[in-house]
């Protein structure tokens, strides 16, 4: 399969910084959702319930972190998979956690424009509760990114990393299906198509 073009190379040159950032965030969110769906396919194979029970259990877990923990534990205790597939997926899970943290930062931030009535993006700011070790520590911690070429590049790199994780997980799904002899299982449509 030919390598997909980089996210950065797909940004139309006529876009301003604000438009480019918003386009790249959209791309990241889309590839992130596709990658989570690939982990769902891993879960689907490992859960051993093609009757719809897997769908109910997955949908009942509302946190991506908890879903990835579930996949991790199912992989960890699955004795019929070879170590190579497990190692590959453990690495993908770890890399996806980092992508998810970045995506969450973008999805739960305040987008500051200047002047306020203008549509020109100036910064992406996020506040969260800080770990408090003593009474004088600040309650909130702040993460900010300037709306500039470096931020565009960072978002593009993370989107590309997520696409690479997606491809690796998708290939692993078919290996899991084959190793566990799950030929009766109809997998959700995955980006690489039937293998």
Image: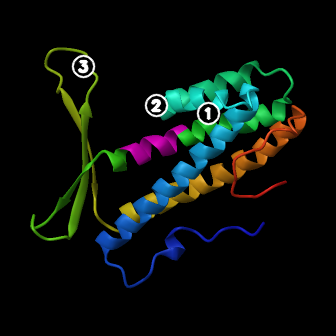
Question: Could you say which disc has been placed on residue 132 in the image?
Answer: 3
| Label pair 1/3, CB-CB below 8 angstroms | no
Residue 36, given in percent of the width and then of the height, sits at 57, 43
Question: Residue at position x 66%, y 37% from top?
Answer: 91
Quick check: is 74 in the magenta stretch? Answer: no
Query: For the residue carrying disc 1, how many other residues have a C-alpha within 10 Å: few (<14), some (14-19), or many (20+)?
Result: some
For mark 1, what is the residue?
A: 55
Q: Which residues are magenta?
A: 97-104
Residue 45, given in percent of the width and then of the height, sits at 75, 34
Query: For the residue carrying disc 2, how many other residues have a C-alpha within 10 Å: few (<14), some (14-19), or many (20+)?
Result: few
Question: Residue at position x 50%, y 54% from top?
Answer: 158
| Residue mark closest to the camera, 2 vs 1 | 1
Residue 58 placement: quadrant: top right
**Dot placed on the residue nearer the N-terminal end, 2 or 1:** 1
Left or right, 102 with reference to 140: right
Note whether residue 64 is visible: yes
Residue 128, given in percent of the width and then of the height, sits at 26, 34
């Amino acid at each position: 399969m030919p390598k997909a073009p980089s996210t950065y190379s797909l940004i139309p040159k006529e876009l301003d910084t604000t438009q480019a950032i918003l386009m790249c965030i959209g791309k990241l969110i889309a590839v992130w959702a596709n990658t989570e769906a690939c982990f769902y396919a891993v879960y689907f194979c490992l859960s051993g319930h093609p009757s719809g029970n897997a769908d109910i259990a997955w949908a009942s877990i509302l946190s991506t972190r908890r879903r990835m923990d579930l996949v991790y534990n199912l992989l960890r205790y699955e004795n019929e998979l070879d170590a190579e597939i497990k190692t590959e997926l453990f690495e993908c899970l770890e890399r996806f956690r980092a992508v998810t943290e970045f995506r969450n930062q973008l999805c739960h931030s305040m987008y500051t424009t200047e002047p306020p009535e203008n549509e020109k993006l100036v910064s992406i700011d996020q506040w969260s509760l800080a770990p408090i070790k003593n009474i004088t520590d600040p309650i909130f911690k702040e993460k900010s990114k300037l709306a500039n070429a470096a931020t565009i590049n960072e978002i593009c790199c993370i989107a590309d990393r997520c696409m690479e994780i997606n491809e690796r997980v998708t290939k692993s799904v078919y290996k899991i299906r084959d190793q566990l002899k799950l030929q009766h299982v109809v997998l959700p449509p995955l980006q690489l198509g039937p293998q």
